[in-house]
């Protein structure tokens, strides 16, 4: 019981692996959220207007926005 | 192979095998999954109570086991993924880990042989608790506006784009995180239990009812496979308890961080 826990300043390989786990699920969550949120909005508008185009636009916009967020959060150097 | 015989005689396991009727006859409500929850809770509570009672400087066997188990969650989950502040959350994380682990492992304990966590209510409830905890920590630490601002408006994006991105960030943090926590645990346990049922019941059917050289060989392979799969399932059960706890810890760690 001598240690106060790992040294947070030192690079920790195991810690990196954990970060990877969380990042993987975070990226997955962003893409799914993008499609669900804007696809959902598109679906609602489509339902009101009786026109399928808004759903398509919503799904695509949501997908690209989600992918952009993944790049923004995790993909930049 | 004559598939028509299989289709007639063998009832393959399905979601129905996760529905239990009350243990004490019709009209009562107490089912096997509930029994497993009660037993699991008692096991964890009694173990840690006995381990911590009369704690001495030179630990006995039981105290050593208790401290090692608790120390595992403290060192490799709380401190590693949250940092020094993680000490405050070790009691919650340790409770979470051992509760899930025990309910999972009930899936390969003879007689019980059902992972109570494959019933969605249990992981759902735990995921909601984790969600409330990490969000309230974030709100407490960074303020209501500050927390959601850091979550939904990461700096470095032209402002019109926020209209598109902010709802996604909010949805992924507040909704998708607890949902994935819950579903990952539930369906790992669900699928694992289903695979074990299939190998064991299928093996039994092949050996006993199908018969012939094909039945004996295939049935034996199936039953031997079920032994290997039982060990594998034990590994998955502990791993999933670890993953659930680890992600809860990482979410808490993220909420504590001031994202400028």
Image (spheres, coloured by chain):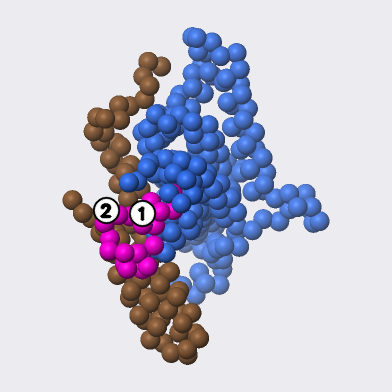
Chain colours: A brown, B blue
For this view, does B100 lie left or right of residue B45? left
Image coords of residue B105 (percent x, y)? 52, 41
* Label 2 neighbour load within 10 Å: few <14, some 14-19, many 20+: few
**Which residue is at 75% across, 52% downward?**
B29
For this view, does B64 lie left or right of residue B113? left
SS assignment at label 1: helix
Using the image, tell me which numbered label, if any, was put on residue A26: 1
Extreme residue toward the right, this view: B27
Q: Which stretch is magenta? A: B147-166
Quarter containing the N terminus of chain B: bottom left
**Which residue is at 37% across, 15% downward?**
A2
Image coords of residue B99 (percent x, y)? 56, 39
For this view, does B6 lie left or right of residue A68? right
Tally of numbered discs: 2
* Label 1 neighbour load within 10 Å: few <14, some 14-19, many 20+: some
Vertical order, B234 against B45 (above or below): below
Chain for numbered disc 2: A
SS assignment at label 2: helix
Q: Nearer the viewer, residue A27 or B156?
A: B156
B150 within the magenta span = yes
Q: Main secondary structure of the magenta part?
A: helix
Q: Which residue is mark 2?
A: A74
Extreme residue toward the bottom, this view: A50
Instruction: Mark yes or no: residue B207 visible.
Output: no
**Which residue is at 47% across, 45% downward?**
B143
Q: Are marks 1 and 2 in contact (CB under 8 Å)?
A: yes
Image coords of residue A39 (percent x, y)? 41, 74
Chain for numbered disc 1: A
B33 within the magenta span = no
Using the image, tell me which numbered label, if any, was put on residue B136: none
């Amino acid at each position: 019981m001598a240690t106060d826990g790992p040294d947070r300043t030192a690079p920790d390989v195991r810690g990196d692996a954990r970060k990877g786990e969380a990042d993987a699920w975070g990226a997955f969550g962003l893409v799914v959220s993008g499609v669900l949120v804007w696809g959902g909005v598109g679906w609602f508008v489509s339902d009101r207007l009786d026109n399928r185009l808004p759903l398509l636009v919503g799904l695509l916009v949501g997908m690209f926005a989600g992918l952009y967020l993944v790049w923004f959060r995790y993909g930049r150097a | 192979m004559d598939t028509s015989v299989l289709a007639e005689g063998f009832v393959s396991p399905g979601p129905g095998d996760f529905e239990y009727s009350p243990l004490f006859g019709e009209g009562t409500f107490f089912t096997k999954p509930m029994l497993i929850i009660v037993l699991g809770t008692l096991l964890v509570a009694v173990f840690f109570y006995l381990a911590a009672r009369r704690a001495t400087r030179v630990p006995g066997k039981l105290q050593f086991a208790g401290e090692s188990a608790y120390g595992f969650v403290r060192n490799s989950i709380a401190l590693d993924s949250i940092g020094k502040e993680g000490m405050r959350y070790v009691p919650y994380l340790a409770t979470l880990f051992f509760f899930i682990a025990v309910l999972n492992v009930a899936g390969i304990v003879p007689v019980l042989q059902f992972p109570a966590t494959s019933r969605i209510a249990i992981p759902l409830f735990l995921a909601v608790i984790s969600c409330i905890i990490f969000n309230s920590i974030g709100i407490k630490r960074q303020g209501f506006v500050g927390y959601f601002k850091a979550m939904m408006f990461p700096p470095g994006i032209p402002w019109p784009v926020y209209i598109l991105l902010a709802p996604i960030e909010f949805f992924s943090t507040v909704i998708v995180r607890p949902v994935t926590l819950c579903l990952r645990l539930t369906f790992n346990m669900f699928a694992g239990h289903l695979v074990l049922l299939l190998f064991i019941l299928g093996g039994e059917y092949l050996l006993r009812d199908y018969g012939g050289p094909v039945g004996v060989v295939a049935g034996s392979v199936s039953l031997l496979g079920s032994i290997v799969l039982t060990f594998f399932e034990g590994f998955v059960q502990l791993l999933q308890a670890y993953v659930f706890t680890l992600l809860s810890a990482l979410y808490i760690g993220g909420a504590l961080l001031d994202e400028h």
